[in-house]
Image (cartoon, rainbow, N blue to C red):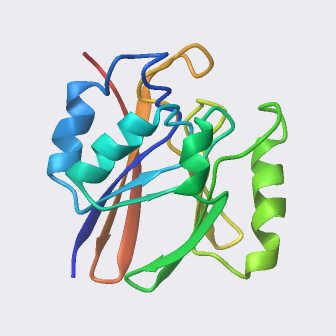
Amino acid sequence: MEMRIVVISDTHIPFRAKSLPKIIYDEIEKSDLIIHAGDFVSFEFYNELKSLKNIIAVFGNMDEMKLLDYLKEVEIFEIEGFKFGLFHGLGPPVGLKQRVLKKLENYGKFDVIIFGHSHIAYYNYENGIHILNPGSPTDKFFGHKRTYGIIEIKNKNISFEIREVIE
């Protein structure tokens, strides 16, 4: 089976932008699933995404309190045999990845860890784990470019791509 996943984080709607860039909506249409690593900010935007596609998400430090009724701090899930860990992140950008790994260490071994918070896109394969931060598709204050991630799973292989939003 093939699976295509759009990975976003730190959308901060409506404060950083009124809506997602059109390219993200186009990507969502072509995908099977949305993974959002927190900081939707508004409950309405979360509901909008939920109405478009299946979504797996966690809350971030800037999300409306109402979202805490619907989202957890950590999500652990499996897709096509790959174990995923999803956590927004916390604290300053320096040491963020280490804090994320520490937070998830009690949940066992992962194939993929996704986080957000810094607005800075990051991907690396280390110690047998794919680690992805998709950055932010709406804000380039910290990351200097607006970005999102695409994960594709085909024939038991998984691939990751960070793409820049150019509009």
Query: How many numbered circles does the render carry?
Result: 0
Q: Quadrant of residue 49?
A: top left
The one of 14 and 159 positioned closer to us in this rendering: 14
Percent of width and height locating residue 113: 61, 62
Q: Is residue 156 left or right of residue 124?
A: left
Q: Is residue 123 visible?
A: no
The quadrant of the picture occupied by the C terminus is top left
Determine whether 84 is above or below 70 in the image.
below
Percent of width and height locating residue 138: 42, 22
Percent of width and height locating residue 4: 26, 62
The one of 16 and 64 positioned closer to us in this rendering: 64
Q: Residue at x 73, y 82 (%)?
A: 108
Q: Is residue 162 left or right of residue 29?
A: right
Q: Is residue 56 left or right of residue 47?
A: right
The one of 142 and 15 positioned closer to us in this rendering: 15
Q: Residue at x 76, y 54 (%)?
A: 100
The quadrant of the picture occupied by the N terminus is bottom left
Determine whether 79 is above or below 147 in the image.
below
Percent of width and height locating residue 47: 34, 45
Q: Is residue 89 visible?
A: yes
Q: Is residue 93 left or right of residue 79?
A: right
Determine whether 128 is above or below 26 in the image.
below
Q: Residue at x 21, y 56 (%)?
A: 31
